[in-house]
Image (spheres, helix red, strand yellow):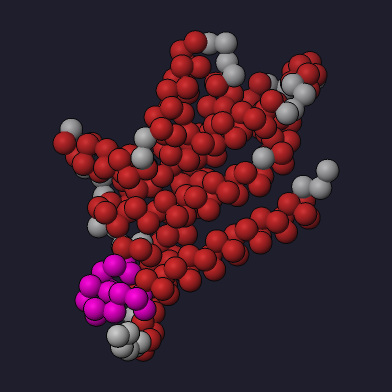
Amino acid sequence: MFDYRFQWRVVFKHWPELLDAALLTMELTFLSVFLGLLIGMVMSVWRKSENKVLFWFTATWVALARNTPALLQIYLFYFGLGALGIHLSSYAAVLAAITFNNVGYLIEILRGGLDSINLAQRGAALGLGMRPWQVYVYVIFPQVLRAVFLPITNQVVWAMLGTSLGMIIGLQELTGMTTFLQSQTFRPFEFYLVAAVIYLIICEIMLMSARLIARQYFRW
């Protein structure tokens, strides 16, 4: 018979640790997406380049990032590089792996945005004396980001959920800390349920914020 006795006070006792872990999760999420966007914007242009080296470099990145498990990518950055003498902390390995994965998806998202923009504007801007990088920074990508804002938001949510894989190499983000605490207190149901609620709340806040931003600033 079901006679499990809930002990929520154990969770409340460890609330500061859970909060710190949730903040670490959000830090990893936004930093990986920020770096992913910076790299992805450059490489989305390369993806459309006539230069075969740049094209195949980005195509290979996209294929590896999208067609291999994120967990395997974390292993490669942590254990693989470690075997070569390049030792990353668990934080750095997860950040590098999630950023690598984000870039693979963001390249394709941004490339779709570039396809939706009339690139005749590029020639016009160059004719006005702007440099190529200025054209993309000030003319092209502001329109691209407007067009793909919501798909990027979905990628942010995925990145946050992906950080949970860091527990496998000892990173105490939200899932890692939850696993550690339940192993110390033997209260798995309470801790995992609270962690799930925290993830849900963070995701809903991000999605609601994205919708408000899109409605306020990205009206067509």
Q: Quadrant of residue 18?
A: bottom left
Residue 120 position in % (x across, y down): 78, 19
Answer whether residue 119 is visible to the viewer in this image: yes
Residue 107 position in % (x across, y down): 54, 31
Q: Which quadrant holds the C terminus?
A: top right
Does the stretch in magenta take in 131?
no
Q: Main secondary structure of the magenta part?
A: helix
- Left or right of 102 in this view: 85: left
Residue depicted at x 46% and y 13%? 53
Residue 136 position in % (x across, y down): 67, 28
- Left or right of 73 in this view: 51: right
Tell me where the magenta segment starts and ends, as one range.
177-191
Answer whether residue 27 is visible to the viewer in this image: no
Does the stretch in magenta take in 182?
yes
Residue depicted at x 26% and y 42%? 75
Tell me if residue 60 comes above or below residue 141 in the rendering: above
Q: Which quadrant holds the N terminus?
A: bottom left
Tell me if residue 192 comes above or below residue 37 in the rendering: below
Q: Nearer the viewer, residue 155 or 29?
A: 155
Residue depicted at x 64% and y 30%? 112
- Left or right of 182 in this view: 129: right
- In the orientation shown, which residue stands out farthest toward the front? 1
Residue depicted at x 57% and y 15%? 49
